[in-house]
């Protein structure tokens, strides 16, 4: 991480850590697009949101993405690794198409603000109903619609806008497709890195009496060199 990037990352962690997942993703999106109006960001669909969050991830941690998972066929642990530049185009996703049901009623994909509002519902059923009505282009004519049919149609549209990883298990040769959640993955990395930075600050402050600002302003290499001398 570049000089001062450590302080920026801790600020991101501090501001987004108390949020529910949809609100947290929107907070991170504001870091990804600092010059964009908040209402514009809230109206991005999840495919657009995740595209920008993967770009933010590349900016903070670089293009190489590494993680772990389990084979759904045999349960073996697997390593997942890819270069984000190989799976992400240079241009943001175009606006999402609408889904039209058998009676000609149209529904759009959920947007960031839709998930935030639905997350305030008392239960899962209420949240699903809230999303259903929010995604109806003409909510006055959404009554009597086949919820399951619309859910499947919107899920198909959403999958086309997600980053899909083709994986294979070396143990059983099973193959499957994994939808990569760039926002959730980015937050896990930010949280892990923030905890490591706080540990570094704690150790260096105890040893040398330096302030947090002084420690975080150091380059990563210089900070690591001082930490090495504490062993």
Image (cartoon, grey):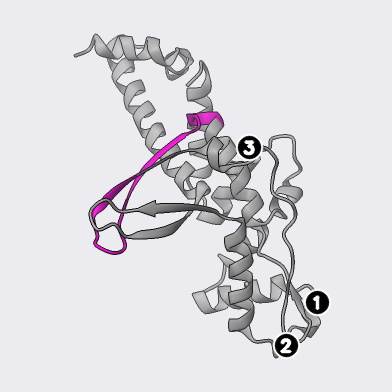
Looking at this view, name the residue that lies furthest to the front. Answer: 173
* Along the viewing direction, whichever of 191 and 79 lies nearer the viewer: 79
Query: Residue placed at 67% from the left, 37% from the top?
Result: 90
Q: Name the residue under label 2.
A: 143
Quarter of image, res 32: top right
Q: Name the residue under label 1.
A: 138
* Residue 79 in sight: yes
Say whether marks 1 and 2 touch (CB < 8 Å): no
* Along the viewing direction, whichever of 47 and 26 lies nearer the viewer: 47
Looking at this view, name the residue that lies furthest to the left. Answer: 231
Q: Which residue range is magenta in the image? A: 59-79
Q: Mark 3 points at which residue?
A: 32
- Against 138, residue 57 (above or below) is above
Query: Residue placed at 67% from the left, 57% from the top?
Result: 45
* Residue 20 in sight: no
Image coordinates for residue 95, horizontal then vertical, percent: 75, 55
Residue 214 got which mark?
A: none
- Against 74, residue 171 (above or below) is above
Callout 1: SS: loop
Image coordinates for residue 223, horizontal then vertical, percent: 37, 13
């Amino acid at each position: 991480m570049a000089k001062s990037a450590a302080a920026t990352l801790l600020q991101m962690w501090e501001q987004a850590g108390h949020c529910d997942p949809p609100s947290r993703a929107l907070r991170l999106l504001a870091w990804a697009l600092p010059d964009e109006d908040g209402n514009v960001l809230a109206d991005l669909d999840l495919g657009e949101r995740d595209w920008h969050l993967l770009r933010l991830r590349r900016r903070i941690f670089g293009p190489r993405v590494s993680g772990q998972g389990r084979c759904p066929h045999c349960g073996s642990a697997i390593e997942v690794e890819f270069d984000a530049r190989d799976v992400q185009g240079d241009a943001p996703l175009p606006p999402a198409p609408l889904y039209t049901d058998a009676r000609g009623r149209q529904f759009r994909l959920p947007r960031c603000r839709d998930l935030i509002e639905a997350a305030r519902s008392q239960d899962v059923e209420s949240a699903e109903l809230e999303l259903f009505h929010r995604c109806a282009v003409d909510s006055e004519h959404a009554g009597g619609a086949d919820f399951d049919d619309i859910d499947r149609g919107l899920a198909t549209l959403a999958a086309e806008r997600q980053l899909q990883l083709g994986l294979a298990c070396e143990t059983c040769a099973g193959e499957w497709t994994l939808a990569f959640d760039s926002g959730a993955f980015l937050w896990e990395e930010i949280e892990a890195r923030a905890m490591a930075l706080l540990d570094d600050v704690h150790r260096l402050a105890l040893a040398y009496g330096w302030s947090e600002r002084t420690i975080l302003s150091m380059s990563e290499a210089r900070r690591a060199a001082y930490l090495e001398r504490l062993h």
